[in-house]
Amino acid sequence: MAPLIIAVMPIGLVFGAVAASKGLSSLEVTLMSALVFAGGSQFVAMDIWSHPASWGAVGFSALLVNIRHVLMSASIGTKMPAFSGPAKYAAMLLLADEIWAMAETRAAQARLSAAWYAGLAVPFYFVWVLTSLAGSVAGAFLGDPKAIGLDFAFPAVFVVLLMGFWKGRQTGAVLAASAAAAVLTHQLLPGVWYIAAGAAAGVIATLVIDQRREACA
Amino acid sequence: MTVDPNVFLAILAMAAATVLTRISGLLLIRFVTIGPQQKRALEAIPPAVLMAVIAPTALVTGPAETLAVLATALAATRLPLLAAVATGVIVVAIARALIGA
């Protein structure tokens, strides 16, 4: 869990700094991180930020960026028999990409407990909110995180987690389909449609392999 | 330390959209029965989403990122999470300095 917390720090600082440069006050930055708690959509919102702020534009873009959460919560939801009803819904409110990926990894090895999930998600949440605040205050003093490679921390976390899902050739087909669809969509469409496209391609690859297997049997 | 009403409304809209996406998957599985095929489809989601998230970084951002993704993946087979992530960060920083990307 420590690696995730450390990886989120530079991202939170950068978000705070970017938001401050767009004219958001520290309180506004903190509120956004606390209430939205979805880094990808927060960065996209900063990309399209206007004065006065357009709630329709940023709300709709958040919906598109986070549409992948529907699949993610459906997937992790089936692995939460140990959670009470309210605990399940509370857990979903903190379902960031990184939390979800760690929880999926955990569920593949052991029974997912509410205490384990809270121990991961709650500190992650507070570090995200606090580093956003710190970034908005520090702002210009921060310098360029790219120079020391810190922007690569999250992609690296995702790579390591991905390696844990390898289960042989069928996984290879899923990954190849997902990568091809994601890169193609990324080149052709703006925004984050590439994540939805990659997810869909991976699922379709699995279903196609299933049908072939049934046809052979 | 002020909150502009317009900004607050925008934040609320983003929060509402995000909560909706996070809850709806949970609601979905209450009303759809999960058979073996649906189960396999759901199991494909985690690796497919992770791959989709990193594919542009891994393949089309630049040689430094491609190299660092490979290094991280290799390191992940031998090292714990934090060490593998550190490997990736160090490799990308060095590669960017050398290649100038």
Image (cartoon, coloured by chain):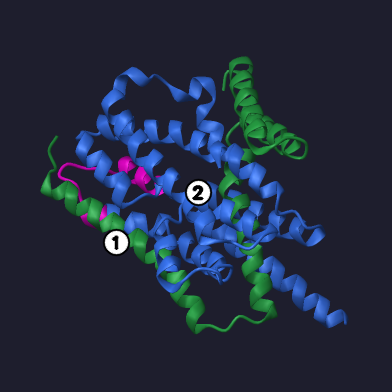
Residue at the (52%, 69%) spot, across then down: A74
Identify the secondary structure beneath mark 2: helix
Q: How many C-alpha atoms fall within 10 Å of the one at disc 2: few (<14), some, or many (≥20)?
A: many
Specify the segment rendered in magenta: A39-57
Identify the secondary structure beneath mark 1: helix
Q: Which mark is residue A120?
A: 2
Q: Which of A166 and B96 is in front in this view?
A: A166
Main SS of residues in magenta? helix
For this view, does A124 lie left or right of residue A213? left
Residue at the (77%, 36%) spot, across then down: B78
The mark total stands at 2
Q: Is residue A125 magenta?
A: no
Q: Where is residue A208 in the image (x, y as percent from the top left)?
A: 73, 72
Chain A display color: blue
Q: Does the magenta stretch include residue A44?
A: yes
For this view, does A49 lie left or right of residue B47? left
- The image shows residue A87, relative to residue B58, as above or below, that is below
Residue A189 shows up from this direction: no
Q: Which mark is residue B16?
A: 1
The chain letter corresponding to green is: B
Is there CB contact under 8 Å for labels 2 and 1? no
Q: In which quarter of the image is the N terminus of chain A?
A: top right
Residue B95 shows up from this direction: yes
Q: Could you tell me how far apart the alpha carbons at marks 2 and 1 are, in whole angstroms? A: 23 Å
- The image shows residue B59, relative to residue B25, as above or below, that is above
Residue at the (12%, 38%) spot, across then down: B2
Q: Position of residue A153 (x, y in %)?
A: 55, 34
Residue at the (63%, 55%) spot, across then down: A106
